[in-house]
Amino acid sequence: MDFVEEFIQANSLFIEIQSDRDNILNPSFNTIAIGMAFDISKVSIVNVFCHWSAIITKLDLNLRNWTVKLTGKVVNDKYGPYAIRIVNEDHVGKTAMAISFQYLKFDQNTKEFSADFNNDDNPDKMKKQFLEVYLREKPEGIKYG
């Protein structure tokens, strides 16, 4: 049996645990994240159950000219993307870069959004950074582009 088959087989055991089965069937969760770590002596698998209103579907990083292109999708019809912010790990209160709704592309029909960051003149570009997506209710009232 190869690694992928073992992972799938081990993860299928979660359906046999009552609390995990309850979480899988719980309508308040719309996302299950699966994590795995292993070494020569053991394997650890973790499932995280949560509710997301938006997801990032693609993230392209170009380290040569330090651009970031992302696409995502809103999974709740009552929200629309309002801003996207990049913050530094060591100072999450400080915005390294931000894009507001005027510079976001958002398709009301497909609920897909995209944004492009150019980080050339950001002195913090080599630090570990996080991406934050802000949503707002009533996306039909947001003037995108």
Image (tube, helix red, strand yellow):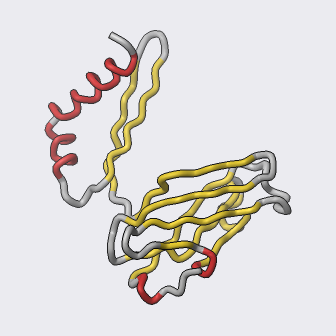
Q: Is residue 14 above or below residue 52?
A: above
Task: Assign the C terminus to one quadrant of the image.
Answer: bottom right
> Furthest-bottom residue in view?
141
Taking the spot 15% from the left edge, 31% from the top edge, the residue there is: 16
Q: Nearer the viewer, residue 120 or 20?
A: 120
Q: Quadrant of residue 79?
A: bottom left
Q: On the rendered structure, is 57 left or right of 26?
A: right
Taking the spot 39% from the left edge, 84% from the top edge, the residue there is: 138
- x then y, percent, for residue 23: 21, 48
Q: Is residue 53 above or below residue 124?
A: below
Q: Quadrant of residue 90?
A: bottom right
Q: Nearer the viewer, residue 17 or 62?
A: 62
- x then y, percent, for residue 104: 58, 73
Q: Quadrant of residue 136?
A: bottom left
Task: Assign the N terminus to one quadrant of the image.
Answer: top left
Q: Is residue 1 above or below residue 71?
A: above
Disc tally is 0
Q: On the rendered structure, is 45 left or right of 40?
A: left
Q: On the rendered structure, is 132 left or right of 135?
A: right
Taking the spot 58% from the left edge, 58% from the top edge, the residue there is: 70
- x then y, percent, for residue 106: 49, 73
Q: Nearer the viewer, residue 65 or 121?
A: 65
- x then y, percent, for residue 21: 17, 41
